[in-house]
């Protein structure tokens, strides 16, 4: 199991778990999201199979818990998976 897979499993077990913003961005990339643009402190991520963008921003060094939950919902709703 890769580090990204372990991180994803950790979030599935506890969606309120705290992870670093850097790890969250790695997770977004692993699932096929691409950084589209930055608007202020918000980084806008897009995915070809998801009709709306996902804006994320750090809370200090960590990812915001509600944005992690939103990401997990998008993964489940659109059947996304970790790419090669």
Image (tube, rainbow, N blue to C red):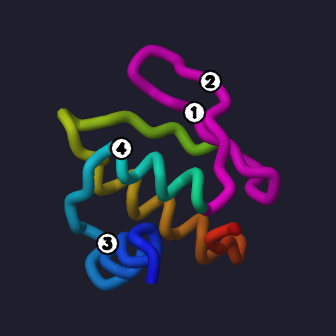
Q: Give SS at disc 3.
A: loop
Give left or right: position of 64 versus 6. Answer: left
Q: Which residue is mark 4?
A: 22
Label 4 and label 2: CA atoms lie apart by: 16 Å
Q: What is the quadrant of the N terminus in the image?
A: bottom left
Q: Give SS at disc 1.
A: strand
Q: Which residue is mark 2?
A: 37
Please tell me how crowded label 3 is: few (under 14), some (14-19), or many (20+) other residues with Cα within 10 Å.
some
Who comes first in sequence, dot 2 or dot 3?
Answer: 3
Q: Which residue is mark 3?
A: 15
Q: Is residue 68 above or below residue 5?
A: above
Residue at position x 72%, y 50% in the image: 47
Who comes first in sequence, dot 4 or dot 3?
Answer: 3
Closer to us: 48 or 32:
32
Q: Which residue is mark 1?
A: 44
Q: Are marks 2 and 3 in contact (CB under 8 Å)?
A: no
């Amino acid at each position: 199991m890769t580090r990204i897979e372990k991180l994803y499993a950790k979030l599935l077990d506890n969606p309120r778990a705290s992870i670093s913003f850097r790890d969250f961005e790695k997770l977004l990339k692993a699932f096929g999201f691409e950084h589209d643009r930055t608007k202020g402190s918000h980084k806008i991520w897009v995915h070809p199979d998801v009709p709306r963008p996902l804006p994320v921003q750090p809370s200090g060094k960590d990812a915001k818990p509600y944005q992690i939950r939103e990401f997990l919902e998008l993964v489940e709703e659109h059947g996304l998976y970790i790419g090669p």
